[in-house]
Amino acid sequence: MLKHAVVAVLSLGLVACANLSTQSLFSHYSAANSKTHQAMQQGLYQQALDVLPDAPAGEILDGMEKGRVGFVAGQYPQSFGALQSADSAVKEQQRQASIQISEGFNQAGALLTNDNMITYRPADYELGFLHLYLALNYLQQSNLEGALVEVRRANQVQEAAKRQREAELNKAAKEARRKGMDQNLGAVLARYPDVGSELGNIQNGYLFFLSGVLYEADGDLNSAYIDYKRALAVAPNNPFVAETVLRLATRMRMDNDLPTLEARYGKYRAPSANTGRVIVFDEQGVVSARDGWRLPIWLMDSRGDGVIYNLALPYYPNPPNKMYSPLQLNGKPMVDSQVANVNGMARYSLQEDLPVIVLRQALRVVAKNEVRKTAASKGDDIGNVLTNIFNTLTEQPDTRSWQSLPASVAIAQQDVAAGQYDLAWNGHQIDVDVKAGRTTMVWVSRQGNQLTGWSVLLGNN
């Protein structure tokens, strides 16, 4: 009597046990990671590291979370190792043909469970941050060469991920049209607010400006200028990025660019002699975690009857608008300006993925309902009830994303006399060594009332 229900439950149970945790089957990532996310928001870095859940999302996402949380907690060797493990897993995922075989099994499990059964593939912007934090780890070790390798790789892996995502979107659109679902899916997608296609939601100005700083420190002014201009395209109203582009354009005699730059930003004014440059990268807050909601969709079943199904989908709640007071350099406020909106990048990435996610969900709820109706048509009332309960419990939104990233990143920049300085905020202090004609880079991260960070002396200006 229970044949159909038992077969379905056992099959799905085997898939779950063989591939992912029970949490992936009956819950979702944001729920499992909530304690870490809350601790990060309060600036309790070591606590956030201590309560990270054990392997809820696979080697890539787990490694990225441990790497970022370990970095702000000052556990630099642990951070470096975790990020390197995530990087190795990404390489394997991208190059190994065998992943396609295991992914086929995961897709089969996802057809009757939820998207959490699918192998996690990081978003384009997450891959950029993976290599950015590897670069920061190298810089914290005063290894400029290693940091440069990572910023070069960041652009390469993001481009590869972008091409793969675009191919998936095209495939999903064709599949939706083939099954006559395109209008139905469009009605669901319309419930999501439009994030907007501003360049700051698509590209990472933080990564571009950091790579420019590193290239310039290495004496590669051409590469530095290219990436500084990319940062300016993302953050055209950032005065420090504009000043930097003007400075290099003037130094390199970029006659084609200078008239346009000077018309908008004015002429570059060189600093006084015997000064050094202080550049601060100021990571603020914590990126929003995805939540789940249920949205209705009208579809035809196998009998041609119209049925309303509920889809369990991820979404981003509105982020808190927290403002941070200025950092103080030797007691004087440092004005900063945003260069990256990580919340915007996360929302845009989800918006881009939604057509694929909604199509998968639609196919799944129809398949689940067919299993339930088969049990009911055989007079299997208990099997029908069990299948219905199983369907409800396993229909979970895929809320996996890198949730320990900052909400936004600002930069501040000053040319100051050579000497010893302290960068302070809310009772926390970082020593800053400034030498004439050189650049001192300061990295800080602020969450809650806490600040963590360090400084490193780079090459000539």
Image (cartoon, helix red, strand yellow):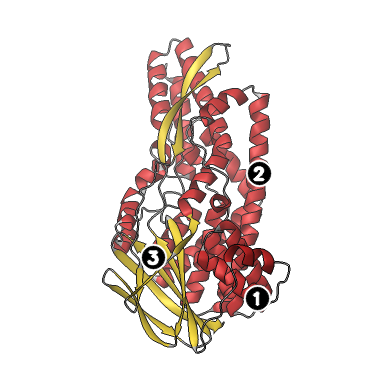
273 lies above or below 47: below
Q: Spatial distance from mark 3 to mark 2, Cα to Cα?
A: 33 Å
- Which type of secondary structure does the marked residue at label 2 adopt? helix
Residues marked 3 and 1 touching at CB (< 8 Å):
no
Residue reaching furthest right?
Answer: 256
In this rendering, position of residue 120 left or right of residue 383 = right
Residue 14: % across, % down: 47, 37
| Residue at image mark 1 | 250
Does residue 162 appear anywhere in the picture?
Answer: yes
Question: Which one is in front, 295 or 88?
Answer: 295
Numbered badge on residue 445: 3
Give the residue type that dot 1 points to. Answer: Thr
Question: Which one is in front, 34 or 416?
Answer: 416
Q: Residue at x 39, y 36 (%)?
A: 26
| Residue at image mark 2 | 166
Give the residue type that dot 2 points to. Answer: Glu
